[in-house]
Amino acid sequence: MAAESKQPLLEMRNITKSFPGVRALDGVSFDLYAGEVHALVGENGAGKSTLMKVLGGVYPHPEYGGEILINGEAQRFAGIRQAESAGIAVVYQELSLVKDMTVGENIFLGREPRRFGIILWDELYRRAHALLDELHLKIDPRTPVRNLGIGQQQLVEIAKALSQTARILVLDEPTAALTESEVETLFKILDSLRARGVGMIYISHKLDEVFRLSDRITVLRDGRTVGTDFTKNLDEARVIARMVGREVGDIFPKRTHEAGAPVFEVRNMTVEDPNVPGKFLVKNVSFSVRRGEVLGIAGLMGAGRSDLLMAIFGAHAGRVRGQIFVEGKRVRINSPSEAIRYGLGFVTEDRKRFGLILDQTILNNMTLASLPHVSGRFVTNADAEAAAGERASRELRVKANNVFTIVGTLSGGNQQKVVLAKWLLTKPRVLFLDEPTRGIDVGAKQEIYAQVNRLASEGLAIVLVSSELPEVLGLSDRVLVLHEGHITGEFKRAEATPEAVMSCATGHVKEVSSKQ
């Protein structure tokens, strides 16, 4: 095996990195061999992304302690460009694309083919087209990035990394927004890179991917190395126990809620694509949800799940038609503020873009949508606001020094808890959850699942969208399946098998029951 060769391609020795009041990395060591996939796992806040930012030159020397060696030679990167010149390409969890530029411009940004200082645009787009073909991404490289979905943007980031002649490729949660077919395409690409001798560091909370791809696994916890072992010597239970410092049982909580009376209904919801007139992202979708019920909405990427929720919440840019009923009364929702007034809450799939103001405090983010509820209608009562924030932070177990901590400094799982708290403080009748556990670790997932179960048991109606089928099946009382904007199936909890749901998700139609 590649990892049995004598000299590592990469060595990171005793790496330390501190931020004000926080020791993010405390003597972490890690190595990588040519042709190896070495998985790096741990809970959010364990230090994985920080370690990779040290490697990628985001945190330049001497902002960190320890040594980095490539093929036995010490490296001191002054910035990202030096790391790239040394053969390191990093696909970060947080996308770094320029939304107003085209796909091709983003792929070759700063490395455009030139002659006499003039960019050769035809050559740039020819190369971009070839890379996109390799990823089986059927998209014009002249398309502005802002017109792409988050999954397509992720593949563009990967294409950007592959455009560099990299010896070391770092992939930080690369499949978080990809469909199953896109994931399979990515895995084939990684296998070909492995055969070419590229060393890869793979960071993912999806342990099935880690065990499928990796040769070795290193676990970080609280900024320290817990251990490294060959993948063949480990199983998921042992890895999870190392990650969280304890044994983890069944990840989904025991169901403790019963559905009551209908509280929310949508009839014939149709959503037009804002970029392609006449194209419908959602067409004639109808459903209802009851008090104390978790309604799961499954489907592949592009099925229209997020577009449906954005349209209901009054936040979709396209033309929307359909009828919405809250507590049996028809309402018209043309903006998120109106949705909030009618008792709807919405945890969006992209928390950094739509859910949080990253340079504001936890408290400001938590109370953003509910100030009239928590501190008075006309004048902000700072004490009441702080008390509400502290109470929500305790209930959701947000890990931070206090509610005045800047939310952008939190781990992904804790950021997601802040978003959830923001909507719970509005006292919603219906809570929409779009990919509520994307990019968070198994421990934080368990806490989110427990909160979903608790909220449903308290009578809240919940609509859950997730690309992780086990999540939909493990939490939902009833499951709707979308395919290309249409409902192709509806299942009660007992009949919602993975095979039946995936059959509908790929276009096979099941007769939808009229009984709910």
Image (cartoon, rainbow, N blue to C red):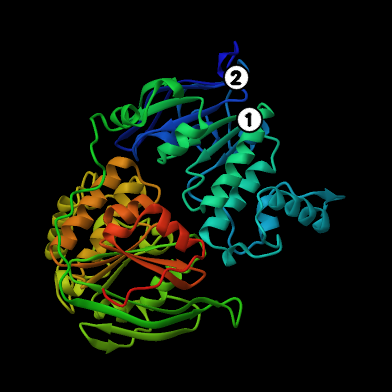
Mark 2 residue element:
helix
Q: Quadrant of residue 455?
A: bottom left
Residue 194 numbered mark, or none: 1
Residue 2 numbered mark, or none: 2
Residue at 69% across / 52% down in the picture? Answer: 132
Q: Residues within 10 Å of mark 1 (few under 14, many from 20)?
A: some
Q: Label 1 near label 2: C-beta < 8 Å?
A: yes
Whole-angstrom CA distance, mark 2 to mark 1, is 9 Å
Q: Quadrant of residue 139?
A: bottom right
Determine whether 457 is above or below 325 in the image.
Answer: above
Q: Quadrant of the C terminus?
A: bottom left
Residue 467 shows in this picture: no
Amino acid type, residue under disc 1 in the picture: Arg
Residue at 39% across / 34% down in the picture? Answer: 47
Q: Quadrant of the N terminus?
A: top right
* Side (left or right) of 291 relative to 188: left
Amino acid type, residue under disc 2 in the picture: Ala
